[in-house]
Image (cartoon, grey):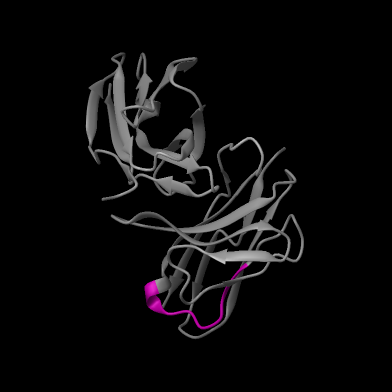
């Protein structure tokens, strides 16, 4: 079992729709949770961090965390073609170990 | 500007010729790490360091060396590169306190022929 699991996709949504990306993790010692966006051939860019249960909103992005279910999600509202990328879910545990998912590829169709 | 700087961005080399990829960060981060990314395998950690003069193996350390003589620099050394080390490499840094995320460098695409 991988430490962080994501559906590889591709997830296709029409422009203007809500894209919903999901991630589960296995380490109950995980303390911090992150979403990175990575364009092809480029480096991962941190777009959301969440540390406690519930929702955290930043512009068009909302991260959701449910520690009891070991589940993290990212919602992208009003999706744009420029949001087309691979989204990596990552967790950091209390020993400062990072685990990354394999990423979900998102395609936003004009 | 807060950043992690990697050099070079692209490198083609021959088997067995020693090379160094440099990494420097200007955010005073204690924690630095090297990853390689290969299609279908995701990000895999090579080495990491939580302090000057302290380095530890990640998941795929074979064939690599690192050093952390100064807080800002964390070079990756391939003493005898082989074709299976052809990959996209990322350096990343993070503060130890606050459990924040990584800031990644721009990446180094290495080809070993």
Kindly tell me whether residue A49 is visible in this rendering: yes
Query: Magenta span has A42?
Result: no
Labels in figure, total: 0
Q: Residue at x 59, y 38 (%)?
A: B99
For residue A109, above or below residue B43: above
The answer to whether residue A74 is left or right of residue A8 is right
Q: Residue at x 47, y 81 (%)?
A: B14
The answer to whether residue B113 is left or right of residue B12 is left
**Could you tell me residue A1's position as x and y percent?**
26, 50
Q: Nearer the viewer, residue A60 or A109?
A: A60
Q: Residue at x 30, y 21 (%)?
A: A19
Q: Quadrant of residue A20?
A: top left
For residue B78, above or below residue B87: below
Kindly tell me whether residue A80 is visible in this rendering: no
The answer to whether residue A91 is left or right of residue B78 is left
The answer to whether residue A27 is left or right of residue A96 is left
**Could you tell me residue B63's position as x and y percent?**
48, 77
Quadrant of image for the C terminus of chain A: top left
Residue range in magenta is B76-84
**Could you tell me residue B103's position as x and y percent?**
59, 43
Q: Nearer the viewer, residue A3 or B75?
A: A3
For residue B11, above or below residue A1: below
For residue B110, above or below residue A61: below
**Could you tell me residue A36's position as x and y percent?**
45, 36
């Amino acid at each position: 079992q991988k430490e962080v699991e994501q559906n590889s996709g591709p997830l296709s949504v029409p422009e203007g729709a809500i894209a919903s990306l999901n991630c589960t993790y296995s380490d109950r010692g995980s303390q911090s949770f992150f979403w990175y966006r990575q364009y092809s051939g480029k480096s991962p860019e941190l777009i959301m961090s969440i540390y406690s249960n519930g929702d955290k909103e930043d512009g068009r992005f909302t991260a959701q965390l449910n520690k009891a279910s070991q589940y993290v999600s990212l919602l992208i509202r009003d999706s744009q073609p420029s949001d087309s990328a691979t989204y990596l879910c990552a967790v950091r545990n209390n020993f400062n170990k990072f685990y990354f998912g394999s990423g979900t590829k998102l395609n936003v169709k004009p | 500007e807060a950043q992690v700087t990697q050099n070079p961005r692209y490198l083609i080399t021959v088997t067995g010729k020693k090379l160094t990829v440099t990494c420097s960060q200007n955010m005073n981060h204690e924690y630095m790490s090297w990853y390689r990314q290969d299609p279908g395998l995701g990000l895999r950690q090579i080495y990491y360091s939580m302090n000057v003069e302290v380095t530890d193996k990640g998941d795929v350390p074979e064939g690599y060396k690192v050093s952390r003589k100064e807080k800002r620099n964390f070079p990756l050394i391939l003493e005898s590169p082989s074709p299976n080390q052809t990959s996209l490499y990322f350096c990343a840094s993070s503060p130890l306190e606050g459990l924040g995320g990584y800031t990644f460098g721009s990446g180094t695409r290495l080809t070993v022929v």
